[in-house]
Amino acid sequence: MGAKSIDLTGQRFERLVVLGKSATRIYGRQLAWDCQCDCGVIKPILTSALKSGSTKSCGCLKYECTPPNSTIHGMSYYSGIKTWQGMLSRCNNPSNKDYAWYGGRGIKVCDRWLDPRNFAKDMGEKPAGYSLDRIDTNGNYCSENCQWATPAQQGANKRNNRMLQHDGQVLHLSEWCRRLGVKPSTVSNRLNAGMDPSLALTMPSRRQRRTA
């Protein structure tokens, strides 16, 4: 009787976590495992490559470790490479601490940006002190919806798009204000003062109280 087959499901190998056996056969016949990289990419990897340590990531590690004179795209010296990795992880990796606010609510990375070279072409170099900002915080990561933004710009965007729970639903502050006909600045001020979100959204303004 042959030895019991090894199950690698759930095990971590460097940046890779094994999700289960892959339907893809490497070189047409060898068993592989579907592995999720910390950057969010999922790809089949051979058992021998995992156990020997010859494969440590989906390939993103090469971009960080490649010398500047290498022929492999030179992405290790791209100023936005960590931003690209973080973007993929937030959208594709359920173990990422911010996944619930990105991939968990349907935010995706466009197919073109799965390749870091295309991301670099579309966004250019990352300016010092800037971060990646989605113009429409309900929209996906793509060139039409992203910009490099300062912390102040990001903060202004986030203040009007913070998530609030009211009446059994969770929506952005801006969407609640649109539905309820209240000013985002009014609600933001109330929340900053410690008011309950539902009360901050529904309490009549002073003008409404005077005319009631």
Image (cartoon, grey):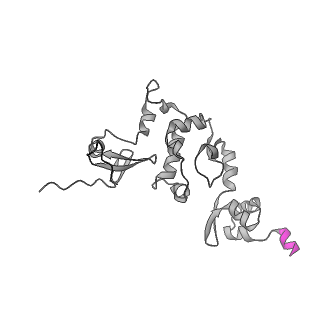
Residue at 56%, 57% (x, y): give it: 101
- Bounds of the magenta segment: 206-212
Which residue is the extreme one toward the left? 1
Whether residue 68 is situated above or below residue 3 in the rendered picture:
above
Residue at 68%, 55% (x, y): give it: 159
Q: Quadrant of residue 118?
A: top right
Q: Return the residue nearer the eye: 113 or 69.
A: 113
Residue at 72%, 68% (x, y): give it: 201
Residue 169, given in percent of the width and then of the height, sits at: 61, 69
Q: Quadrant of residue 183?
A: bottom right
Residue 65, given in percent of the width and then of the height, sits at: 42, 33
Which residue is the extreme one toward the front? 28
Query: The N terminus is located in which quarter?
Result: bottom left
Does the image show residue 76? yes
Query: The C terminus is located in which quarter?
Result: bottom right
Which residue is the extreme one toward the top? 69
Residue 108 left/right relative to 145: left
What main secondary structure does the magenta stretch of the protein show? helix
Whether residue 148 is situated above or below residue 68 in the rendered picture:
below
Residue 7, given in percent of the width and then of the height, sits at: 27, 55
Residue 108 is one of the magenta-drawn residues: no
